Amino acid sequence: MLVCYACEDRSPWFVLAFAAACALGSVYGFLQGAWPFGVVEAIFAAVAVRRWSIKVRQG
């Protein structure tokens, strides 16, 4: 997640990889029972997917 976040300026695919890592972190948080962490990671994933879609449209 951290590596993808650091490399976001290089390619929109790093933004999408960051979103996937956040989604996996969210699932882990919910499965572990730490639902506040799961909620925050889900929000991060949603924001990253939106940022990815904007970057892809811009070229």
Image (cartoon, rainbow, N blue to C red):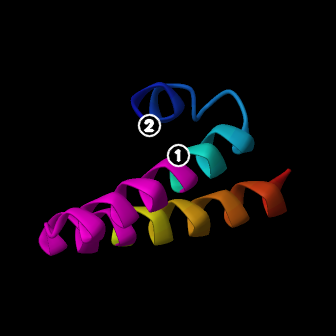
The reply, left or right, for residue 2 in relation to residue 33 is right
Majority secondary structure in the magenta region: helix
The reply, left or right, for residue 57 in relation to residue 21 is right
Quadrant hosting residue 17: top right
Mark 2 residue type: Met
Q: CA distance from mark 1 to mark 2?
A: 5 Å
On the image, the x and y values in percent for residue 43 come to: 35, 72
Q: Quadrant of the N terminus?
A: top left
For the residue pair 55 and 22, the one nearer the viewer reads as 22
Residue carrying label 1: 18
Kind of element beneath mark 1? helix
Answer whether residue 1 is magenta in the image: no
Mark 1 residue type: Phe
Q: Residues within 10 Å of mark 1 (few under 14, many from 20)?
A: many
Residue carrying label 2: 1
Q: Are marks 1 and 2 in contact (CB under 8 Å)?
A: yes
Answer whether residue 41 is magenta in the image: yes
Q: Residue at x 33, y 58 (%)?
A: 28
On the image, the x and y values in percent for residue 2 come to: 40, 30
Kind of element beneath mark 2? loop
> Which label was assigned to residue 3?
none
Instruction: Give the extent of the magenta segment.
Output: 20-42
